[in-house]
Amino acid sequence: MPDSTDTEMAAAVGPCASIPADSMAFVRQVLDRVGDKWSMLIIAVLENGPVRYTDLQRRIPGISQRMLTHTLRQLAEDGLITRTAYAEVPPRVEYALSPLGRGLHEIAMRLIGWAADHHEEIRAHRSRTGTPTGTTASPRS
């Protein structure tokens, strides 16, 4: 029996049915990229126009300099944000949503809002199942 990683089969029903089998791996990569917490928060913060790196860092509590740099680079590579460097002393760099990123902004805001609205309920469920609230669930051995 072939492994699902060796050959992609199109889904017969559901949301994956409209995605061609040869595109499924890339679609999963895109979802992984845009669906991570730091990408979502960066896209949300860029809502009102260009923002400098240090301002992004201040507006996204908990993000490390390394993770911010890495995520900005990935979002720019995918065309979701723009990076504009100004030839000034000291140098100035600003990040803004691209038209493609603006299309994702409303979705990101809705997901962040949903998480904010339901975090206490989810915390309660985790406490009932013994899952620590500051971590993600991992398979138990």
Image (cartoon, grey):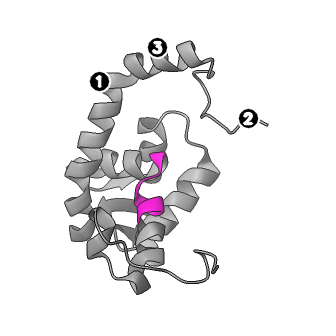
Q: CA distance from mark 1 to mark 3?
A: 13 Å
On the image, the x and y values in percent for residue 47 come to 24, 49
**What is the crowding at mark 2: few (fewer than 14 residues within 10 Å), some, or many (at least 20)?**
few
- As drawn, the residue found furthest toward the right would be 141
Tell me the mark number nearer the camera, choosing from 1 and 3.
3
Q: Are marks 1 and 2 in contact (CB under 8 Å)?
A: no
At a point 25% along the width and 69% down the height, the residue shown is 100
**Main SS, magenta residues:** helix
The residue under label 1 is which amino acid type? Asp
Q: Which residues are magenta?
A: 31-37
Q: Is residue 114 left or right of residue 126?
A: left
Badge 1 or badge 2: first in the primary sequence: 1
The residue that label 3 is drawn on is: 124
Name the residue beneath numbered marker 2.
Answer: 140
Nearer-N-terminus badge (1/3): 1
| Quadrant for the C terminus in the image | top right
